[in-house]
Image: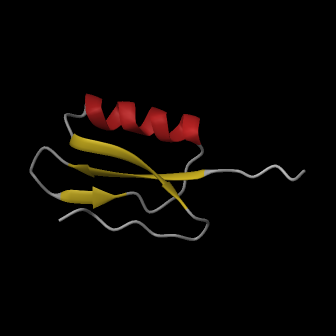
Amino acid sequence: MPITMKNFGLTWTDPAGKAWASGVSYDKASAENRQARLVAERCKDVEIIETEPGQVLQPRK
């Protein structure tokens, strides 16, 4: 049975109100770490999203 790695990206809004999306994929633990850092920087609507390999997230509008 093959082991499948799940990929995750993040979307968020920075303190100035600009929407962003990660340009890289993370494993779950790394995505959670990045989420915690974004929240500490006072970003809002920080969301971890499971992605497909090669999928590029777009900022929320």
Task: Residue 8: give x, y in percent of width and height.
Answer: 52, 51
Task: Residue 2: give x, y in percent of width and height.
Answer: 86, 53
Tally the numbered discs: 0
Residue at the spot x=10%, y=52% of the render?
17
Task: Residue 61: give x, y in percent of width and height.
Answer: 17, 65
Which residue reaches farthest right?
Answer: 1
Task: Determine whether 40 is above or below 26 in the image.
Answer: above
Judging depth in this view, the residue of 42 and 9 nearest the camera is 9
Task: Residue 28: give x, y in percent of width and height.
Answer: 56, 40
Which residue reaches farthest front?
Answer: 1
Judging depth in this view, the residue of 35 and 61 nearest the camera is 61
Q: Is residue 56 left or right of residue 43?
A: right
Residue at the spot x=36%, y=33% of the render?
37
Q: Is residue 54 left or right of residue 42?
A: right
Task: Determine whether 48 is above or below 23 in the image.
Answer: above
Which residue reaches farthest left?
Answer: 16
Residue at the spot x=24%, y=34% of the render?
41
Judging depth in this view, the residue of 15 and 27 nearest the camera is 27
Q: Is residue 58 left or right of residue 31?
A: left
Residue at the spot x=37%, y=30% of the render?
36
- Colour setup of the view: secondary structure
Q: Is residue 58 left or right of residue 42?
A: right
